[in-house]
Amino acid sequence: MIIKTKTRISLIICILGIITTCFGTSVSEKSFELTSPNGKLKVLIRVGKNIKYSLIFSDKLLLENNELKLVLKDKVLGEAPIIKSQKMGEFNEVLTPVVPLKFSKITDHYNNLYLEFEKDFGVEFRTYDDGFAYRFITKIPGEIEIIDECFSVNFPDEYKLHLQQTPSFKTNYEYPYTHLGSSKFDEENKMSTLPVLVETKNKYKILISESNLFDYPAMFIRGKNTNGVQSIFPKNPIEFEPNNDRSLKIIKEADYIAKTDGNRNFPWRYFMVSENDGDLLENTLTYQLAPKSKIKDPSWIKPGQVSWEWWNGASAYNVDFVSGYNEETYKYYIDFASEFGISYIIMDEGWAKSTTNPYTPNPDIDLFELIKYGKERNVDIVLWLPWLTVENNFELFKTFKEWGIAGIKIDFMDRSDQWMVNFYERVAKEAAKHKLFIDFHGAFKPAGLERAYPNILTYEGVLGMEQMSRATPDNSIYLPFMRNAVGSMDYTPGAMLSMQPEIYHSKRPNSAGIGTRAYQMALFVIFESGLQMLADSPSNYYRERECTEYITNVPVTWDETLSLDSKLGEYVIIAKRKGEDWYIGAMTNNNESSRLIEVSLDFLYGEDTYEMEYFEDGVNAAKQAMDYRHSKKVVKKTDKLNIKMVRNGGFAGVLKKIH
């Protein structure tokens, strides 16, 4: 049910002729105050020579006099704007995600203000209890060219910025986070991808990202020389030349960032505001601001875990066949997946005779026999392809469906200009038509397409474990607060060889992860992905059976998510519910000493008792990261849980109700 009212919204109009000014503005300006449903968040919007807004939370000014405008080829929307009308309302609706990564039910409660201007455009503002968003809406006949969009944010004090900086728009989104004072992030610095996390002087956090990204380039952020940030966008490419088997070289760009329909809604720019660091882990604004599913019957979409052969080099040992990218090895992976209830295996690069021909398998593989073999064991196959091969063979979706393939892992897009953003949508639409799911690897972050097409189960866009030594806990500890806070993330966890960083060495087939064994297991609870990888070799999982039995029983979709105790850059402790069962995951950074953190189990229901099975760092895990302790005990909601983690350590547990 949607409720529309005029309650809880204050509309303040500073009319020409009033002697005093409003928010320091001239008498010709009009000002509006839009509050969140609970009244804690306020946005002060000022319309005069331009459109500006300030953000206040709990009576503290967080952002000041931020400007927005849209630069078209023949006019600037937001410059000398003239208001034609305004419309206000309160909306309250319960959303039910097809792929519930955090919650099976999401309350979408916000206040809304729409300002309609002359020049056939408007700006829509929304305030939530935990954030604020705005977007442009145009009603211009025909096609328009967008030269630029101004997203300009000013900080009233020195803040700390957490960024994923990149030297160019051609990026795999796999750079480590950098942490800069806001005045140090100037125009000379490398720009940043989204999301950006802002840490205010009074320790509020502001997560900046976007949603409803369609037929438009992704936004990047760069510094200003005035203690703030501003938008920068890739130009639309219009001419290409061959480069290699997985990309094209852009040889000419347009002078616009987008050529698009003039009658449309533009992407949402949003600010999620948190008083507590853990609130970031529960953020769902990307989903809430995205369009509804375009798939009428999504019942065929099946999130799940997947066994992956690339990270470990398709290796196997203690077997009676020569391992590699061959039929025997893939049957071994299928048998492993079947035994542990894993839904899928991925056949990554090497399954096809060449990377450019998606119709001819590797001659060492009878693909159709493997498809049949898997289906007999309730295991489906996912095939990897470079995006360029997909673009050149769009009929492959129909073919793969006829073969019996469940989904496609598409790689190396490494761009987010308008052309490439549209490629994502074309792929999602065509895949849905043939009931195939998609894993976008070499991809940008989620920005709303995955709600419109929930057959997109995951995106990479992260410095994940396939980067070996670069995937450190010191960097990964930021992922739940930033990258995973905006949507599904293909980090590829599951290492059974665990090492502390000072002695780390990893090379396929003996690939290893930095961090303790308990840390690695906790990632399956903490990190969200509709297609969750098990990156290691089945041989290692068989060897570590009790750990494997735990991680393969961790769900990939959830009914409820609660941050128990989390501190940005230091540790995460989270609880997630699936039905009656609760899972707890904890991870920490490379802190000098162990952490001992007490958390309450008061989130458990009523007087019920639970059996808790858990894995924690062993007494020697700070030196020998393979060391862990596996235990069980009975708990109830009045109990406290002491979680001890060594450096780069973790904790993973499951609580099942005793009937």
Image (tube, rainbow, N blue to C red):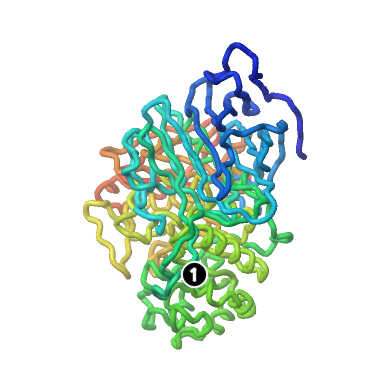
Query: Which quadrant of the figure has residue 158?
Result: top left
Residue drawn at x 27%, y 46% is 622
Classed neighbour count for the residue bearing mark 1: other residues with Cα under 10 Å, few (<14), some (14–19), many (≥20): many
Instruction: From the viewer's side, name the closer residue of 201 and 535.
Output: 201
**Residue 345 location (% of width, % of height):** 51, 70
Instruction: From the viewer's side, name the closer residue of 191 and 310.
Output: 191
Residue 112 in sight: no
Quadrant of the frame with the C terminus: top right
- Name the side, left or right, on which 526 lies relative to 162: right
- Name the side, left or right, on which 27 lies relative to 465: right
- Name the side, left or right, on which 227 lies relative to 41: left
Instruction: From the viewer's side, name the closer residue of 41 and 419.
Output: 419
Looking at this rendering, what residue extends furthest in the left direction? 502
Q: In this view, does 490 lie above or below 389?
A: above
Looking at this rendering, what residue extends furthest in the front direction? 74
**Residue 366 location (% of width, % of height):** 51, 86
Looking at this rendering, what residue extends furthest in the bottom direction? 363
Query: Which quadrant of the figure has residue 88?
Result: top right
**Residue 333 location (% of width, % of height):** 47, 73
Q: Name the residue under label 1.
A: 387
Residue drawn at x 31%, y 36% is 184
